[in-house]
Image (tube, helix red, strand yellow):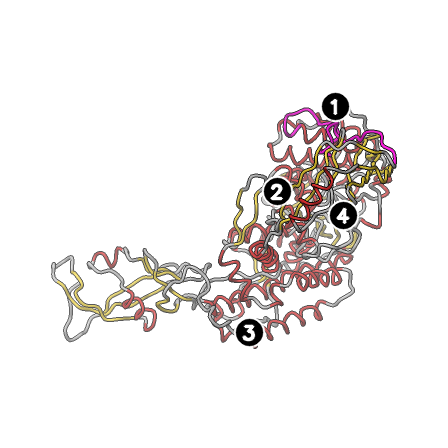
Amino acid sequence: MKLVIAEKPSVAQSLATVIGATVRKDGYLEGNGWRVSWCVGHLAGLADADVYNPDYAKWRYDDLPILPEHWQMVVSKDKKKQFAVLKQLMNAPDVTEVVNACDAGREGELIFRAVYELAGCQKPMKRLWISSMEDSAIREGFENLRPGADYDGLRDAALCRAKVDWLVGINATRLFSVLYHRTLNIGRVMSPTLALIVQREAEIDTFKPVPFYTIVLELPEFSVSGERMADKDAAEQLKTACQGADVTVKKVERKDKSEKPPALYDLTTLQRDANRLLGFTAQQTLDYLQNLYEKKLCTYPRTDSRYLTSDMAEGLPVLVNLVANAMPFRKGIAISCDAGAVINDKKVTDHHAVIPTRNLQNADLSGLPVGERMILELVALRLLCAVAEPHTYSETAVTVECAGAEFTTKGKTVKRPGWRALDAAYRAALKNAEPDKETEDKALPDGGRLPELSEGQTLHLSGATVKEGKTSPPKHFTEDTLLSAMETAGKDDMPEDAERQGLGTPATRAGILEKLVSTGFLERKKSKKAVQLMPSKDAVSLITVLPEQLQSPLLTAEWEHRLSEIERGELSPEDFMGGICAMLRELVRTYQVIKGTEYLFTPPREVVGKCPRCGGDVAELQKGFFCQTESCKFAIWKNNKWWAAKKKQPTKALVTALLKDGRTRITGCYSEKTGKTYDATVVLEDDGRYANFKLEFDRQKGGAK
């Protein structure tokens, strides 16, 4: 009997159907010599800090840095039942081999290995590695199972990534939260990403527009423009000079040009286009694409490749034709298939580019949720464009001379629309409009074509004007442009074929953006044309106080590069982790609060004491006294029924005393039994869920209750 473990029940069901494990059991499927079960995502993860030392439940500067010597994995409380099923299945005497069928990537490897090791399993391990959930791909994958040891590097990289995220998150978050009296979530990738946005906003805020002036000459059938001029008076003088001078054609250059089709989608480029064209967030796009993958309509989503492998070339024309027939926007447009444009074995790593599957021909696309259908159409469009003919056109550049100055314009004549015909048809379908003819230079009345001109020809000047403009500031980030910046760690000049050393991975970037929004550091703000990503005041404050090693995109990208080296077996995990630990020791040892920024973060709340549960700051708010540690729920409510029955309300002085000593003397408590008042000592008893109180009385004097 062989055991297959998938990442989630829906995937397990698809695998089981193909290999014949169709009998449903408690937590698994069985049949045809196979058992198939599932992990329900991350069943296990790195233990919290207080597992290593109960004292770490409280956030204290003196405990930092927290650097576990022996890391522990623990099973999530809500997933212990399924873990018990997997442990029993893995160690069953009749199971001879375990197949890791979790997601074919870094995180999927970690999900399986954590369970395998926690279960104490020592059975032989194989790896199912597929890029599509089509039945044919699943069969081929099971026919070509790979040794599990081939992916030890992937496991090491995944575990190191989890550890470094834990170390940076725990230590930096606690350090800055304690020093700045506010819970500040800091992450290995999250903080440098935030730094990119804050830096962009600073550039926009400090930008000073510079006016410029351009002279435009109106000629028969077209217009020409001069170079930008900084001096308005000089521009006006040149305009006046042109009005009384001849216009002579100085140069006419005609060139035939070709624009190659775009490459296929990897996850990041798909997320960018979906944000720009459809308004989807990166997370929405990933979720829709994941659903399409599980429905067998698209290939594996979390890929960083934009090409296909050579073994896919033979079947590509059939796929292209059925995709074209399923897409209504391409009606009337001839379809071609240049497989060579998208085949490149050297540029395919773990998974090839995202493309539709052949299951498209039998699917009811109208029955898909709107978001999934729109993403599927975008993926289909990119496949059709990528294998289509190039867009070819003739470009004419004209230079004329007038009053000793040169003026230029360009015209364009389309020879073969090629892939751009498909792109224009898709965009028109989005707007429920007819496809525009090839967009040309809008300055030309006939849509881009210049009249026949010859060098030395004299033209009649219809008029001359001075157009005033201003230089533009950098644009606010959108998810489209931020994903691009994350991919290159903020470098604008990275060559297309360079090895990417970016912030995060295609699989993690969407989650990072969502966390920045949920923690209040980023806000999605609608503008006329797009949804912009705007940093909050606290985001700007955080980047102001963070040292370079925690906010540098290039340094974080270098860490990501080293994780890739671990995956390839080129760097030992011990060397990598040693460097991270040394950095954190240095950070805690040397970092000092920047003078004047102690209460930089809003809202400033008066701290009344330390939390008995986690050691964080307790502050007074309108309705009570609350721990400022985000993950801690300690609270003393002002309208607490226990206090109300005694006709008392917790005051700042009373709560301060309770938090300091655990008890305090109160006077004038009302007794519901006697209707009289009494004095007593109130004792704070926190059970980890609720802050409870009890009364103690002076034995000699007694007291009423």
Q: Residue at x 56, y 39 (%)?
A: 528
Looking at the rendering, the stretch of residues picked out in magenta corresponds to 429-455
- Mark 3 burial class by Cα count in 10 Å: few <14, some 14-19, many 20+: few
- Tell how many labels: 4
Left or right relative to 704: residue 430:
right
Q: Amino acid at mark 2?
A: Asp
Q: Which mark is residue 287?
A: 2
Can residue 139 be found in the magenta stretch?
no
Q: Tell which circle, 3 or 1, labels the residue nearer the N-terminal end.
A: 1
Please, what secondary structure does the residue beneath circle 1 have?
loop
Task: Evaluate if marks 2 and 1 touch, with contact meaning CB atoms under 8 Å apart.
Answer: no
Q: Label 1: which residue? A: 331
Left or right relative to 417: residue 61:
left
Q: Tell which circle, 4 or 2, labels the residue nearer the N-terminal end.
A: 2
| Quarter of the rendering containing residue 690 | bottom left
Spatial CA distance of label 2 from label 1 is 29 Å
Q: Tell which circle, 2 or 3, labels the residue nearer the N-terminal end.
A: 2
In this rendering, which labeled residue sits more in front, label 4 or label 3?
Answer: 3
Q: Amino acid at mark 3?
A: Tyr
Q: Which mark is residue 591?
A: 3
Q: Amino acid at mark 4?
A: Ser
Between 283 and 459, the one nearer to me in the picture = 459
User: Is residue 161 placed above or below 345 in the rendered structure?
Assistant: below
Q: Tell which circle, 1 or 4, labels the residue nearer the N-terminal end.
A: 4
In this rendering, which labeled residue sits more in front, label 1 or label 4?
Answer: 1
Spatial CA distance of label 3 from label 1 is 63 Å
Please, what secondary structure does the residue beneath circle 4 have?
loop
Q: Looking at the picture, how far across and down is residue 302, in whole percent? A: 69, 47
Q: Tell which circle, 4 or 3, labels the residue nearer the N-terminal end.
A: 4
Q: Label 4: which residue? A: 305
